[in-house]
Amino acid sequence: MKQRSLLAKMVLLPCSKLYGGITYTRNKLFDMHLLKQVDFDVPVVSVGNLAVGGTGKTPHVEYLIRAFRRKRHLAVLSRGYRRKTKGFIIAGRTSTPSDIGDESYQIYHKFGGDVVVAVCEDRVFGIRELMRLDPTIDMIILDDAFQHRYVHPAASIVITEYNHPLNEDRMLPYGRLREPARGINRADIVIVSKCPANMTPWDYRETVNRYNLFPSQYLFFSHYAYQPLCPVFPDIATSVPYLDWLTSADSILAVAGIGNPRPFVRHLKSFGAKVKVDIFADHHQYTKKDIEHILSRYKQLKGKQRIIVTTEKDAVRLAANPYFPHELKAVTYFLPIEVEFANPYGDIALEDVVEKTIAEHFKDKA
């Protein structure tokens, strides 16, 4: 194991240094205004991270949607990761995860009546198209856009995981960082996600000291609040009340293709059922062979009450999967999550800080 780690360090660490140098140079070109950023008259709120995978961007984007959907005409623009299409697309009733990506599909089906959902690799073009098609939009949330610096956002939010401190990480491919940790200094708001529910005042102080943000930056702490189970196939779900399944199930097959499935699995195990786990890559597209494997694993579960529980993001892909067998549809559920904030340094809400940052941005532009 030590030899393998040494080999990885010898091969990957030089690549990380090279990648870090490239991203540092690129950011410097933006800082020196040699690469141009585009300002928009509509408030743009960027939500992103410095590390790859599993920081919880989508639940935080959904929090912002809930906070602003009654106050503003919202649009959410992402690149549509892992979609099979290209260019600018607005989500509609006939859209599929393959058309717009699983996260955009999930957001559209949750909030489609309250928010315009679109995808485009070129965020500048995407924003212009949104405003051309619907000039009444008065806030755009950019999902996964912290490194997309061609757009100058009115408010920039970076999300970082509690258990993966940036100062202990390395650049890709040796580590998980997309850019050097000091890039966090560009953010207006930093959210430490997936915090323990029982954080002490000392834990908060240690985290505050670790990130050592500028006085102008805001630091928030969030944790997941798991919601009651929902059927992936509601039309044919079992007649047994699914709200009671987690407490009454004998066996659970946990199926997850997300960046960090550990909190999801940990939550399922907390109910006392015997949990078997099938983990796939983030944004995994389930093949016929994968579905056959899931069916086989389900049949091996013990007990009378056996269910499959997946994540909300995976449910989107499984619901649209043509190979998913009818015999599993009645016992397959997903576990919704929302984020809640614990802010021991004041009662100001995230949405209030976003509004304040937007106002300051446009005041400086005037």
Image (tube, rainbow, N blue to C red):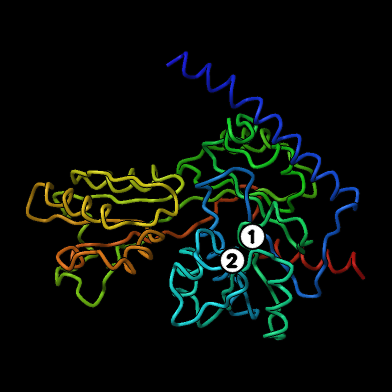
Q: Residue at x 53, y 16 (%)?
A: 6
| x and y percentages locating residue 142 in the rendered image | 65, 64
Q: Amino acid at mark 2?
A: Leu
Q: For residue 164, what is the image quadrant?
A: top right
| Residue closest to the eye, 88 or 188 | 88
* Image location of residue 70, percent across then percent down: 59, 80
C-alpha distance separating marks 2 and 1: 8 Å
Tell me the kind of residue under disc 1: Leu
Element type where label 1 sits in the image: helix
| Residue at 26% in and 71% down | 233
Q: Residue at x 29, y 62 (%)?
A: 229
The x and y percentages for residue 9 are 57, 21
Residue 319's quadrant in the figure?
bottom left
Tag 1 residue: 350
Q: Is residue 348 left or right of residue 235?
A: right
Circles 2 and 1 in contact, beta carbons < 8 Å: yes
* Residue to which mark 2 is pinned: 64
Q: Quadrant of the N terminus?
A: top left
Crowding at mark 1 (Cα within 10 Å: few <14, some 14-19, many 20+): some
Compared with 315, 160 (above or below) is above
**Is residue 178 shown above or below 308?**
above
- Please report whichever mark, 2 or 1, sits nearer to the chain's N-terminal start: 2
